[in-house]
């Protein structure tokens, strides 16, 4: 006896006219697929809050899916439906690209790989009728941005606020790595146990905001700096925030305007060598010594800039009383300016210089 199995025809999806909240999309899809419309509505709301795509996708479904009792193509013009499909596809690809690039930027590239594998598996196994060609667009939207971010060498820590890192000790031979997130980063080495000599390897990956490497003020630490500034992400963040990027590398009071290079700060004064490999996503960078009484986050430009000495006042045609007052005032300002200028000259070069060692 032969048994024949009759497959039930798949019910066409249409927007419901009964029990709908807005356009009837969730009610119609739920009725056709046997899904509770409440779960579909919750999915659209969550997608709108998390990724911002819930409402555009719902509007696209509203345009594409015919209403109940309506023949497909009658209620909407063909070009409008085609435009909605194209916009929905582009929006989906853009969302995948942003998610993949963001995950890779924060060191979570495995998420992009897992998402690409899941899409490929779904196309090949769950929907074999589509064929592998349909997986190329979403796979390209995920893989290409992730590879581009990974090739740029920029990586952020998963934090958004200020981070202070103060290691207990640094020893020759190893490599200490410190990474910034979307906030500011302070690598405080003032209380770190440092050897009397040898080479200390430190890698600092700065972010889109300020990065400070604070060295001891009471001892000489030679700096061998290799730096590279990649301002792309800083420019993106500045465009979003509406402010100009604060790029630049300032080492012991000297501004380095090139985006990459090498600088060796050494002197006959004995001390360890800090081999600093520094990359920045465009935020300003400070490398220098700071006294314990100075907070680098509050005063990153310590000890300040050289002071311009005010010339003596011109007293031609001025009464003697007023001239004496002007001279006394100028002498007081001049003495303060000389002290400030001497303070900057003694401290700006750091403790490895002759002026710093004589403090």
Image (cartoon, rainbow, N blue to C red):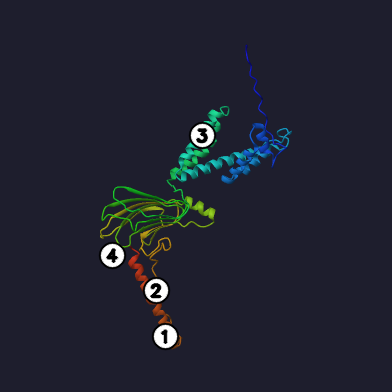
Q: Residues within 10 Å of mark 3 (few under 14, many from 20)?
A: few
Which one is closest to the eye, mark 1 or mark 4? 4
How far from the left and from the top, in percent, is residue 146? 48, 41
Between marks 1 and 2, how big is the CA–CA gap? 20 Å
* Labels 3 & 1 near each other (Cβ < 8 A): no
How far from the left and from the top, in percent, is residue 272? 28, 55
Mark on residue 309? Answer: 2
Relative depth, front residue between 102 and 251:
102
Choose the circle earlier in sequence order: 1 or 4. Answer: 1
Secondary structure under the numbered disc 2 in the rendered image = loop
Q: Name the residue under label 4.
A: 357
Between marks 2 and 3, how big is the CA–CA gap? 69 Å
Q: Name the residue under label 1.
A: 324
Q: Is residue 209 left or right of residue 195?
A: right
Q: How crowded is mark 4: few (under 14 residues within 10 Å), some or many (20 or more)?
A: some
Looking at the image, is 155 positioned above or below residue 319?
Answer: above
Residue 218: image quadrant is bottom left
Secondary structure under the numbered disc 4 in the rendered image = helix
How far from the left and from the top, in percent, is residue 66? 70, 35
**Residue at image x 34%, y 67%?**
345
Q: Residues within 10 Å of mark 1 (few under 14, many from 20)?
A: few
Between marks 4 and 2, how big is the CA–CA gap? 25 Å
Between marks 3 and 1, how big is the CA–CA gap? 85 Å
Choose the circle earlier in sequence order: 3 or 1. Answer: 3
Q: Mark 3 points at which residue?
A: 118
Which one is closest to the eye, mark 3 or mark 1? 3
Secondary structure under the numbered disc 3 in the rendered image = helix
Choose the circle earlier in sequence order: 3 or 4. Answer: 3
């Amino acid at each position: 006896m032969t048994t024949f199995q009759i497959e039930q025809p798949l019910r066409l999806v249409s927007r419901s006219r009964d029990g709908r909240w807005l356009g009837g999309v969730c009610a119609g899809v739920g009725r056709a697929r046997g899904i509770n419309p409440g779960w579909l509505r919750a999915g659209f709301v969550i997608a709108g809050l998390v990724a911002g795509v819930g409402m555009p996708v719902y509007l696209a479904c509203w345009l594409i899916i015919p209403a109940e009792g309506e023949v497909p193509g009658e209620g909407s013009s063909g070009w409008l439906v085609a435009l909605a499909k194209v916009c929905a596809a582009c929006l989906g690809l853009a969302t995948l690209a942003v998610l993949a690039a963001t995950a890779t930027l924060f060191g979570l590239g495995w998420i992009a790989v897992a998402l690409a594998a899941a899409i490929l598996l779904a196309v090949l196994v769950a929907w074999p009728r589509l064929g592998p060609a349909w997986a190329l667009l979403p796979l390209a939207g995920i893989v290409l941005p992730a590879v581009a971010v990974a090739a740029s060498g920029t990586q952020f820590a998963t934090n958004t606020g200020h981070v202070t890192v103060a290691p207990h000790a640094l020893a020759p031979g190893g490599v200490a790595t410190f990474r910034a997130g979307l906030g500011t980063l302070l690598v405080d080495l003032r209380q770190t146990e440092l050897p009397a000599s040898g080479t200390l390897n430190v890698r600092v990956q700065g972010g889109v905001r300020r990065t400070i490497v604070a060295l001891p003020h009471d001892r000489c630490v030679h700096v061998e700096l290799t730096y590279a500034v990649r301002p792309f992400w800083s420019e993106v963040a500045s465009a979003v925030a509406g402010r100009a990027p604060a790029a630049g590398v300032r080492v012991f009071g000297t501004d380095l305007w090139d985006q990459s290079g090498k600088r060796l700060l050494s002197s006959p004064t004995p001390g360890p060598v800090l081999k600093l490999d520094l990359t920045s996503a465009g935020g300003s960078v400070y490398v220098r010594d700071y006294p314990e009484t100075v907070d680098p986050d509050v005063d990153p430009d310590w000890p300040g800039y050289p002071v311009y000495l005010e010339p003596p006042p011109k007293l031609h045609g001025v009464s003697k009383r007023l001239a004496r007052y002007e001279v006394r005032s100028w002498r007081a300002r001049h003495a303060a300016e000389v002290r400030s200028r001497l303070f900057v000259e003694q401290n700006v070069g750091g403790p490895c210089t002759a002026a710093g060692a004589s403090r």
